Amino acid sequence: MTSLTADATREESMALKTGVWLMSLGAVAFIGYAAIFLARNFTDSFLELGIGAEQVSVGKTEIEAFSPSLYDYISHLHIAVSGFIAATGLAVAALSWFGVRRGYMWAWDAAVAAPVLGLAVALPAHYPYGFDTVGHLGLIYLATAIFVVGAVLAFKALLETRS
Protein backbone atom coordinates (compact mmCIF):
# COMPACT_ATOMS: atom_id res chain seq x y z
CA MET A 1 0.00 0.00 0.00
CA THR A 2 2.84 2.37 0.83
CA SER A 3 4.48 1.89 -2.58
CA LEU A 4 1.21 2.78 -4.34
CA THR A 5 1.00 6.01 -2.37
CA ALA A 6 4.65 6.81 -3.08
CA ASP A 7 4.18 6.11 -6.81
CA ALA A 8 1.04 8.26 -6.93
CA THR A 9 2.86 11.11 -5.16
CA ARG A 10 5.78 10.79 -7.58
CA GLU A 11 3.38 10.97 -10.57
CA GLU A 12 1.60 14.00 -9.13
CA SER A 13 4.97 15.60 -8.52
CA MET A 14 5.99 14.90 -12.11
CA ALA A 15 2.75 16.43 -13.43
CA LEU A 16 3.32 19.53 -11.29
CA LYS A 17 6.97 19.78 -12.36
CA THR A 18 6.03 19.44 -16.03
CA GLY A 19 3.25 22.00 -15.68
CA VAL A 20 5.52 24.46 -13.89
CA TRP A 21 8.27 23.94 -16.47
CA LEU A 22 5.83 24.66 -19.33
CA MET A 23 4.35 27.68 -17.54
CA SER A 24 7.86 29.04 -16.98
CA LEU A 25 8.87 28.32 -20.58
CA GLY A 26 5.80 30.20 -21.86
CA ALA A 27 6.61 33.11 -19.56
CA VAL A 28 10.23 33.24 -20.75
CA ALA A 29 8.91 33.19 -24.33
CA PHE A 30 6.91 36.33 -23.46
CA ILE A 31 10.21 37.95 -22.47
CA GLY A 32 11.75 36.82 -25.76
CA TYR A 33 8.86 38.35 -27.71
CA ALA A 34 9.35 41.59 -25.77
CA ALA A 35 13.05 41.59 -26.68
CA ILE A 36 12.20 41.22 -30.38
CA PHE A 37 9.62 43.98 -30.04
CA LEU A 38 12.19 46.27 -28.39
CA ALA A 39 14.96 45.50 -30.87
CA ARG A 40 12.76 46.23 -33.89
CA ASN A 41 12.09 49.70 -32.53
CA PHE A 42 15.78 50.53 -33.02
CA THR A 43 16.15 49.02 -36.50
CA ASP A 44 14.98 50.08 -39.93
CA SER A 45 12.05 47.69 -39.44
CA PHE A 46 10.68 49.94 -36.66
CA LEU A 47 7.21 48.43 -36.86
CA GLU A 48 6.35 45.39 -34.80
CA LEU A 49 7.11 41.84 -35.90
CA GLY A 50 4.65 40.71 -38.57
CA ILE A 51 3.43 44.21 -39.40
CA GLY A 52 4.29 45.35 -42.91
CA ALA A 53 3.10 47.49 -45.79
CA GLU A 54 -0.19 45.54 -45.93
CA GLN A 55 -1.06 46.80 -42.44
CA VAL A 56 0.75 50.16 -42.29
CA SER A 57 1.30 52.10 -45.51
CA VAL A 58 4.41 53.93 -44.30
CA GLY A 59 7.60 52.90 -42.55
CA LYS A 60 10.12 54.39 -40.17
CA THR A 61 11.58 56.91 -42.63
CA GLU A 62 8.19 58.20 -43.76
CA ILE A 63 6.86 58.50 -40.20
CA GLU A 64 9.97 60.33 -39.07
CA ALA A 65 9.86 62.66 -42.12
CA PHE A 66 6.14 63.36 -41.62
CA SER A 67 6.46 64.14 -37.92
CA PRO A 68 9.58 63.60 -35.79
CA SER A 69 7.48 64.03 -32.65
CA LEU A 70 5.01 61.36 -33.82
CA TYR A 71 7.95 59.06 -34.54
CA ASP A 72 9.31 59.69 -31.02
CA TYR A 73 5.87 59.02 -29.55
CA ILE A 74 5.47 55.71 -31.40
CA SER A 75 9.00 54.73 -30.43
CA HIS A 76 8.30 55.45 -26.77
CA LEU A 77 5.16 53.29 -26.97
CA HIS A 78 7.18 50.42 -28.46
CA ILE A 79 9.69 50.70 -25.62
CA ALA A 80 6.99 50.92 -22.94
CA VAL A 81 4.93 48.02 -24.28
CA SER A 82 8.01 45.81 -24.63
CA GLY A 83 8.91 46.65 -21.04
CA PHE A 84 5.47 45.68 -19.78
CA ILE A 85 5.45 42.44 -21.77
CA ALA A 86 8.89 41.53 -20.41
CA ALA A 87 7.93 42.50 -16.86
CA THR A 88 4.79 40.35 -17.05
CA GLY A 89 6.84 37.44 -18.38
CA LEU A 90 9.37 37.80 -15.56
CA ALA A 91 6.67 38.01 -12.88
CA VAL A 92 4.81 35.01 -14.30
CA ALA A 93 8.03 32.96 -14.56
CA ALA A 94 8.90 33.77 -10.94
CA LEU A 95 5.39 33.01 -9.70
CA SER A 96 5.40 29.72 -11.60
CA TRP A 97 8.89 28.59 -10.68
CA PHE A 98 8.96 29.64 -7.05
CA GLY A 99 5.28 29.60 -6.05
CA VAL A 100 3.37 27.09 -8.16
CA ARG A 101 6.25 24.61 -7.93
CA ARG A 102 5.89 24.73 -4.14
CA GLY A 103 2.17 24.06 -4.42
CA TYR A 104 0.79 27.54 -3.73
CA MET A 105 -2.57 27.97 -5.41
CA TRP A 106 -2.40 31.75 -4.95
CA ALA A 107 0.78 31.75 -7.06
CA TRP A 108 -1.01 29.77 -9.78
CA ASP A 109 -3.92 32.24 -9.66
CA ALA A 110 -1.59 35.24 -10.03
CA ALA A 111 0.58 33.55 -12.68
CA VAL A 112 -2.50 32.86 -14.80
CA ALA A 113 -4.30 36.15 -14.12
CA ALA A 114 -1.41 38.38 -15.24
CA PRO A 115 -1.13 37.21 -18.86
CA VAL A 116 -4.90 36.74 -19.14
CA LEU A 117 -5.39 40.39 -18.20
CA GLY A 118 -2.65 41.57 -20.57
CA LEU A 119 -3.96 39.53 -23.49
CA ALA A 120 -7.60 40.42 -22.78
CA VAL A 121 -6.72 44.11 -23.04
CA ALA A 122 -4.24 43.90 -25.94
CA LEU A 123 -5.59 41.30 -28.35
CA PRO A 124 -9.02 42.73 -29.24
CA ALA A 125 -7.46 45.91 -30.69
CA HIS A 126 -5.54 43.84 -33.24
CA TYR A 127 -8.56 42.51 -35.11
CA PRO A 128 -10.52 45.56 -36.32
CA TYR A 129 -7.37 47.14 -37.79
CA GLY A 130 -5.99 44.05 -39.51
CA PHE A 131 -3.02 43.69 -37.16
CA ASP A 132 -3.93 40.06 -36.44
CA THR A 133 -1.32 38.54 -38.76
CA VAL A 134 0.29 35.21 -37.96
CA GLY A 135 3.67 36.92 -38.19
CA HIS A 136 2.60 39.45 -35.57
CA LEU A 137 0.63 37.33 -33.11
CA GLY A 138 1.92 33.85 -33.91
CA LEU A 139 4.77 33.84 -31.37
CA ILE A 140 2.51 35.19 -28.63
CA TYR A 141 -0.12 32.56 -29.46
CA LEU A 142 2.56 29.86 -29.33
CA ALA A 143 3.92 31.10 -25.99
CA THR A 144 0.36 31.32 -24.65
CA ALA A 145 -0.47 27.78 -25.82
CA ILE A 146 2.64 26.40 -24.09
CA PHE A 147 1.76 28.35 -20.96
CA VAL A 148 -1.88 27.16 -20.99
CA VAL A 149 -0.88 23.49 -21.30
CA GLY A 150 1.46 23.97 -18.35
CA ALA A 151 -1.17 25.83 -16.34
CA VAL A 152 -3.71 23.04 -16.89
CA LEU A 153 -1.22 20.34 -15.89
CA ALA A 154 -0.14 22.29 -12.81
CA PHE A 155 -3.73 23.08 -11.84
CA LYS A 156 -4.74 19.42 -12.01
CA ALA A 157 -1.71 18.44 -9.92
CA LEU A 158 -2.44 21.15 -7.36
CA LEU A 159 -6.06 20.02 -7.08
CA GLU A 160 -5.01 16.37 -6.65
CA THR A 161 -2.65 17.25 -3.80
CA ARG A 162 -5.48 19.08 -2.03
CA SER A 163 -7.79 16.04 -2.19
Image: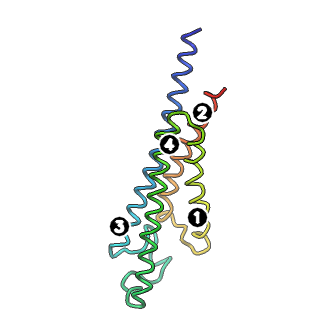
Instruction: Check if mark 3's residue and mark 2's residue have beta carbons within 8 Å.
Output: no
Characterize the local packing of mark 4: few (<14), some (14-19) or many (20 or more) Cα atoms within 10 angstroms. Answer: many
Instruction: Check if mark 4's residue and mark 1's residue have beta carbons within 8 Å.
Output: no
Asked if residue 115 is positioned above or below residue 43 in the image, the reply reads: above
Name the element at disc 1. helix
Name the element at disc 3. helix
Tell me the distance, in whole angstroms, between the alpha carbons under discs 3 and 1.
Answer: 21 Å
Identify the mark nearer the N-term, 1 or 2.
1
Please indicate whether residue 14 sits to the left or right of residue 43 in the image: right
Residue type of the residue flagged with mark 3:
Ala
Q: Determine which of the numbered discs, if any, sits on residue 91 in the image.
A: none
Tell me the distance, in whole angstroms, between the alpha carbons under discs 4 and 1.
Answer: 23 Å
Label 2, on which residue? Answer: 158
Label 1, on which residue? Answer: 123
Instruction: Name the front one of labels 3 and 4.
Output: 4
When asked about the image quadrant of residue 122, the answer is bottom right
Furthest-top residue in view?
1
Name the element at disc 4. helix
Instruction: Name the front one of labels 1 and 2.
Output: 2
